[in-house]
Structures are given as structure tokens and as C-alpha cells.
Image (cartoon, grey):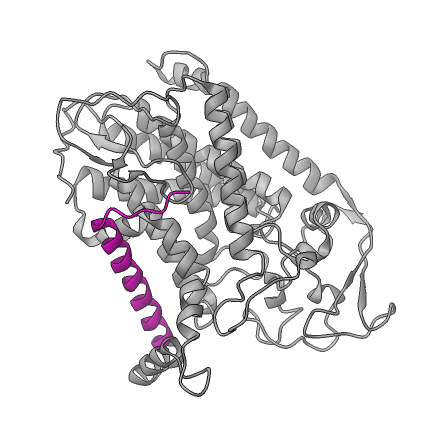
Amino acid sequence: MLEKVRHNLGLPMASITVVTVPDGDRTPLLHDYQPEYSGGGTEYSSTQSSEEPPPKNSNGPKERLVSLDVFRGLTVSLMILVDDAGKAFPSINHAPWFGVTLADFVMPFFLFGVGVSISLVFKKVVNRLAATKKVLFRSTKLFLLGVILQGGYFHGRDNLTYGVDLEKIRVMGVLQRIAIGYLLASVLEIWLVNNTVVNSAVAFVKRYSFQIGAGILVGVLYMVLLYGLHVPNWAFEISSLSTILPTSLGANSQIVHCGLRGSLEPPCNAVGLIDRILLGEKHLYQRPVYRRTKECSVNSPDYGPLPQNSPAWCLAPFDPEGILSSLMAAITCFVGLHYGHILVHCKGHMQRIFFWLVSSLPLLILGYLLNVLGVPYSKPLYTLSYMFITAGASGVLMTIIYFIVDVKCIRKPSVIFQWMGMNALIVYALAACDIFPAIVQGFYWRSQENNLVDLSERLLQSMFHSEKWGTLAFVVLEIVFWGAVAGFLHTKRIYLKL
């Protein structure tokens, strides 16, 4: 059981050290170490940055920065909710192309949390080359794990098969995008920090000025490519897709007519162009979110049959975690770095909360204004307006959780999220990627539909006399189940280390 630390505004602030367990250190989802929190001075350190163990603080008992665990666990829970209940409640599912829904905040929350963790881990870097080597190795492992989980080998719930044709394996995905953001943000934190002593707001900006410049350059590069690249006409094969439309190229091909630049619509954007060139259409996501638009589904905003006279691009592949959009997504990690820097350098709880809110408000305003001025919110493209609005929302959520959990020490209501955040990678792989449900469904009675997963969901739907609310109840119980599993693993000191 974690011991509570007294949080009084007049006391000196926390130090961050590395968590170790009897079986070795462990890795929370998407980063190396979860920092600890104590009642001592304002120093943050990590063995990731130095081979020597961090000095122990003798000023009081130490405990983890619980708010970061809760933030991470809440994000994983939100992913389970929108993925499994999104079909019953399309309003919380991903927006078909333009717009923002509850589901569209999940990825930015992950990336933001990664950035915060990185800023704490790499506060002091003794050997930059060694730290960079570790980052490269861990990024590679995370990327490969993403390919295994989302590349097509596991066919998910309601499909008791597995295996993938290597010619059609999906290259990009959720963990792959996070690996890219983690790599870029870590490199910034290792190599692009000045030695300026932070004793004022100006000194704070000077210390991280190169990082700010790098973030601006990445954003400019994205905008130049998004609006400047010429997208020519292109063709794609639809033989592996379920619906075939008559085409001028024969039954297995379709032509998408573009010949323009600056388009943000599904068929002719630069994000898809770069992925088709670098990855190949066969290695992209074959059931993209725009299949739920009015042009492509009679059941929009849900998936459904193609309408009459639907455009050819409705069956075209598109990866929502593509290369160019992942470059823009890395900026959300950079924003998380900034919030972590405030945590490191500000000595008071209220100081941190004030500067976090001051940082979040301009992001929200910029996101809204860009949307009004014609840069729409789009998660598949990870547009600039979408990045700003979701990064600002991430900052606000982190601030609220920090105030409740680490300032007021109200932790019992969020303990399930805390446990899930401490073992988020296991929960993500088994639950959000449908590995565990698929395993359970593999044991059935006479018919494949007679398995524990489907029977439980149908029972709840019958009890609630509603398919929608029964599904929601099933998903809530699913989240509670995984919280209990994570809690059990925590009591046994079992953590997945990547």
C-alpha cells in the first residue's frame, strides 16, 4: 500500500527517483520508468540517464507520482470504452473524417503522457550516447510489438483465426506512432536542452528554446507537405475487400481522380500519398474510418453498405496512424515535455497548476480559431487544429487529476485507473487489442456464438432490455475486470517490462 504524503503549499516540493521492484525495474506503457514523488526538494533523476542509482531523499517517505498513473490508466480505459461501445454509441466513436469525438482524444492523451514521463526521466543525462542507444532500442521494440499486435496476425474478437500474409501486413499502428513520438521527444530531451539555470520565466524559455524551435520546424514541415505536395491520380486493388464496384480498369482495380494539392478530403490528401509511396497500399489499414462517412455508408456515422453511386475511394486503403500524421502527432509529445518541465522547475502545487492551465488555454483557443479559419479537426490527418485542441484538453485533464490525486490526496475513487496505469501495456495488449477476448471465445459450446464473452454480453442486453445499454454495461464490467487484474498484478509486483 502506498503511503500518503502531506501536501502543503508551504512545504518544499517533490523529488523524482526511479521505481525498482525485487525482480528488477519495470516499464509502464510507453516509457522507461514511472517517477516517484516525495516531500523533499525539487530534483528529478533517473537511471535511464545515468548508470548510477539516484540519490535517496531523506526528508520524508516517497511514493509514485500517482496522477500520471491515473492519467495513463484512464486513457487505456477510455480506449476500451470507445472501441467496444463505439458501435452501440456512434457519437463516442471516432469521427468519420472531420470533427472530434470522445474517441479522438485517446491517442493524444497517450502521447501527452509519454512526453510528461520523458521530461522526468531525462532531467539529468550523464551519457547522452548511452541514453540515446537505449531510446533507440526501446523504440524499436515498441514499434515491433505494435506490428505484431496490429499488423494483422491477430484477427480479433469474433474471428477464431490468426495469421497474416507478409505482403499485406500493416506497418503502422497505435504503438508504432507512440514509438515515433517517444523517439523524437527523447532525442530532444537528451540533446536539445541548454545548461541555463531556471530562475525565471525567461530562463525557462532559454533552457528549452531549441526544443521549441524543433517543434515549430516539425509543424512547419508538416504544413508544407500537407498543403504543398501535388497528389496525382492513383489506382488501387480491391480484390481483397468485401465489396467490389465496376471500374474502368476491370473488376479488381479502381482509379481515384485527384491531380491537385492542398486537399484535406479522404481521397486526395498528402498524408495518404506519402504512405502509399513509402509503405505501399497493401501495407495500409484496409478498413479506414472514412468508410463511415455519408458518401461511403448508408448507416453513417457507423459502418454499413455502400450507397448507390458511392465514390471509388470508399474502398481505398488509408492508415489513420500514417507517417506524416505521426510526425505531427510527435508534437503532442513535445507539449507533454513542456508540462513535465513545469513539474520539474516549479516548487509549489499551485504554481504548477497555474502554469499548466496558462499553457492549456492558448492551445485550446488556437485549436478552436484554426478550425473556424478553415483548418478542420481531423484525427486521421492529425491536423494542426486537432493537435492544438487535443493537447490543450490533455493538459487540462492532467491538471485536474493532479489536483485531485496528488494535491488533495483523494485516491480511492481512482485506484482502478492507478492500477491500470501501472500495468497499462498488459491491459492494452490483452484488452484493447482483443487478444484476451479472442482467447476466451476460442472455448465454446457446439456453436462459436456460445462462448463466455458473447453469452455475457447477451445476458446483460436481456437484463437491460436494450442492446445499447446492455453493451455499455458489459464494457463497464470489462473495464472493472481489467482494473482488478491490474490490481492483482500490482499486489504481486508483476509488471510488463518492454
The residue lying at 49 percent from left, 41 percent from top is 388
Give how far across and how far down residue 142 sits, in percent.
Answer: 49, 44
472 drawn magenta: yes
Q: Nearer the viewer, residue 213 or 321?
A: 321
Toward which corner of the image does residue 201 lie, by quadrant? top left
Where 334 falls versus 483 (above or below)? above
Give how far across and how far down residue 168 sits, in percent.
Answer: 68, 59
Give how far across and how far down residue 332 sits, in percent.
Answer: 48, 39
State the predominant SS element of the stretch in magenta.
helix
The residue lying at 38 percent from left, 35 percent from top is 116
Residue 310 in view of the camera: yes
Residue 359 in view of the camera: no
Toward which corner of the image does residue 82 lie, by quadrant? bottom left
Q: Quadrant of the N terminus?
A: top left
Q: Nearer the viewer, residue 471 or 105?
A: 471
The residue lying at 46 percent from left, 82 percent from top is 448
Toward which corner of the image does residue 235 lie, by quadrant? bottom right
Where 355 falls versus 285 (above or below)? above
Q: Nearer the viewer, residue 225 or 287?
A: 287
477 drawn magenta: yes
Give how far across and how far down residue 292 sits, in percent.
Answer: 59, 67
Residues shaded magenta = 469-498
